[in-house]
Amino acid sequence: DTEVTQTPKHLVMGMTNKKSLKCEQHMGHRAMYWYKQKAKKPPELMFVYSYEKLSINESVPSRFSPECPNSSLLNLHLHALQPEDSALYLCASSQDPFLEQYFGPGTRLTVT
Amino acid sequence: EDQVTQSPEALRLQEGESSSLNCSYTVSGLRGLFWYRQDPGKGPEFLFTLYSAGEEKEKERLKATLTKKESFLHITAPKPEDSATYLCAVQGYSGGGADGLTFGKGTHLIIQP
């Protein structure tokens, strides 16, 4: 089983809202990732958690705040987003930080 | 900085017409090269990992190969269901920390019946 689940599938939020994206995997993977993908563009890395510790933050604006409550869960807290933040947000996990990553279906975020 | 360039950007083939997709890369040291397939509005689906030059992997109609500077994804006798965007990604050495993937822009493949 290589399933990564993400909720919600779709999210529409205003620029003053606070919302959270959730990601879950039960494969025993020890690395989890957040990527952002704009239309017709490749995924771009936002955050990496390795063994539940944030190891990479690719200069992402502070309006995005990641959280890893345990080895199976990953959250992305959103606050005061801009319309240009509208995108597909992808979660991925890997057994080891340097092995293949398995992606979830994504959350389609629209900021109005 | 790791860089990945994929060509062509788009490719339209007839069903059964074999072809190859190219992925050129520049990394300080290659940990792994990955191929993914992505359907519209969905997350990338893992296909292959290649670690060293000369390595080859096969799965159904797909075969991935790796040299020191590029990788090829060969598609033999494709079917319409092979239509998708194929993404190449690399992971390089970065001083010991965990890394995400650097993706190319992808090749949008259309297989016509």
Image (cartoon, coloured by chain):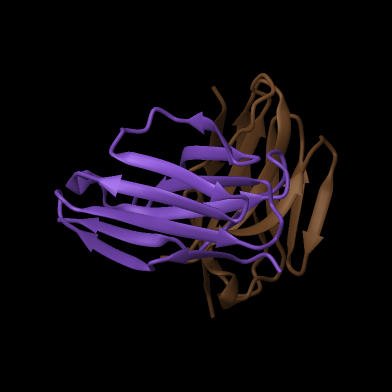
Chain colours: A purple, B brown
Q: Position of residue A41 (x, y in %)?
A: 40, 47
Residue B20 at least partly seen: yes
Q: Residue furthest front?
A: A69
Classify the position of the C terminus of chain B by image quarter.
bottom right
Q: Position of residue B32 (x, y in %)?
A: 72, 38
Q: How many marks?
A: 0
Q: Residue furthest bottom?
A: B113
Q: Nearer the viewer, residue A54 or B4?
A: A54
Q: Nearer the viewer, residue B49 or B11?
A: B49
Q: Quadrant of residue B37?
A: bottom right
Q: Is residue B14 above or below residue B113?
A: above
Classify the position of the N terminus of chain B by image quarter.
top right
User: Residue visible at 60% across and 56% down?
Assistant: A72
Q: Is residue B32 above or below residue B83?
A: above
Is B85 on the left or on the right of B17, as rendered? left
Q: Position of residue A19 (x, y in %)?
A: 29, 55
Q: Nearer the viewer, residue A15 or B19?
A: A15
Q: Quadrant of residue B33?
A: top right
User: Residue visible at 31% across and 33% down?
Assistant: A62
User: Residue visible at 61% across and 33% down?
Assistant: B99
User: Residue visible at 69% across and 23% down?
Assistant: B96
Residue A42 at least partly seen: no
Q: Position of residue A97 (x, y in %)?
A: 68, 39
Is A55 on the left or on the right of A46, as rendered? right
Is B46 on the left or on the right of B5, as rendered? right
